[in-house]
Image: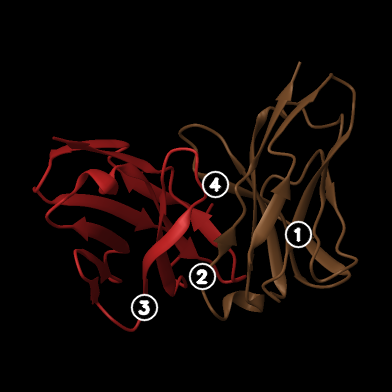
């Protein structure tokens, strides 16, 4: 069936370093790929998204890249800060317009 | 203050009891969703509704029921038929058919079955 695999499940980086989280999807018809951030005890919030007609999108310290041929997309966070500590979820939109989600990556920023 | 509100935040239930979780939004969104969040499993779709008086089963609908009588409201009932109901439940809203992409989430309801 359709699925989205997300890696790693936990990522620990030194403050100021970069973090990369990767997702692969199975449905070749998927055309929209959002990333959500969920801080501890809070609701998930959209931080960046990308549509299938572009290969990369940036917003300040975060960027997302998409490789449609390989069916994978990645979240890049540069110059990490303590407030980046959270669980990050990737998702892919299916042909019925519903999202299928990755299992999440817990990002830990070490001081 | 616009947003999406879930209640209650915490709920305890005895086995064999039904329980209803409330979800209300004032964002004028057509679509509303219920997700279940378990550790290490991401978000799994229970039910969704793209328009009033219509809803569709998601990936894990068994043991749950919903209604969509008003645009603003999408309550979820966890029935006694749900084998493992202890979980964190998230309600979300957005544009119909994903036209705006972004989903707005409530703060969640944590259900514990005793």
Q: Which quadrant of the rendered structure holds the C terminus of chain B?
A: top right
Element marked by disc 2: loop
Q: CA distance from mark 1 to mark 3?
A: 32 Å
Give a yes or no on whether discs 1 and 4 share a subunit. Answer: yes
Residue A105 in the image: state x and y as whole percent.
34, 42
In the image, what residue occupies the spot 57% across and 81% down? B99
Name the chain letter of the residue that bears numbered label 1: B
Disc 1 crowd rating (10 Å Cα; few below 14, some 14-19, many 20+) is many
Q: Which residue is mark 3?
A: A52
Q: Which residue is the site of mark 4?
A: B43
Indicate the colour of chain B.
brown
Q: Secondary structure at mark 4?
A: strand
Tell me the subunit letter for badge 3. Answer: A
> With respect to residue A25, does B20 lie above or below?
above
Q: Which residue is mark 2?
A: B102
Q: Nearer the viewer, mark 4 or mark 2?
A: 2
């Amino acid at each position: 069936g359709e699925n989205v695999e997300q890696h790693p499940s936990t990522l620990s980086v030194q403050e100021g370093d970069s973090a990369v989280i990767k997702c692969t999807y199975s449905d070749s018809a998927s055309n929209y790929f959002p990333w959500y951030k969920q801080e501890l005890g809070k609701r998930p919030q959209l931080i960046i998204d990308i549509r299938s007609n572009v290969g990369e999108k940036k917003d300040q310290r975060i960027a997302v890249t998409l490789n449609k041929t390989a069916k994978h997309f990645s979240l890049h966070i540069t110059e990490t800060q303590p407030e980046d500590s959270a669980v990050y979820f990737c998702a892919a939109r299916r042909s019925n317009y519903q999202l299928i989600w990755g299992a999440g990556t817990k990002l830990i920023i070490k001081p | 203050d616009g947003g999406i509100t879930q209640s209650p935040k915490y709920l305890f239930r005895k086995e064999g009891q039904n329980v209803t979780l409330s979800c209300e939004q004032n964002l004028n969104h057509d679509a509303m969703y219920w997700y279940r969040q378990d550790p290490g499993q991401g978000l799994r779709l229970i039910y969704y509704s793209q328009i009033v008086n219509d809803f569709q089963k998601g990936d894990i609908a068994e043991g749950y029921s919903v209604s969509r009588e008003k645009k603003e409201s999408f309550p979820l009932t966890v029935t006694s038929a749900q084998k493992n109901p202890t979980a964190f439940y998230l309600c979300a809203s957005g544009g119909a058919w994903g036209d705006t992409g972004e989903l707005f989430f409530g703060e969640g309801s944590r259900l514990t079955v005793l």
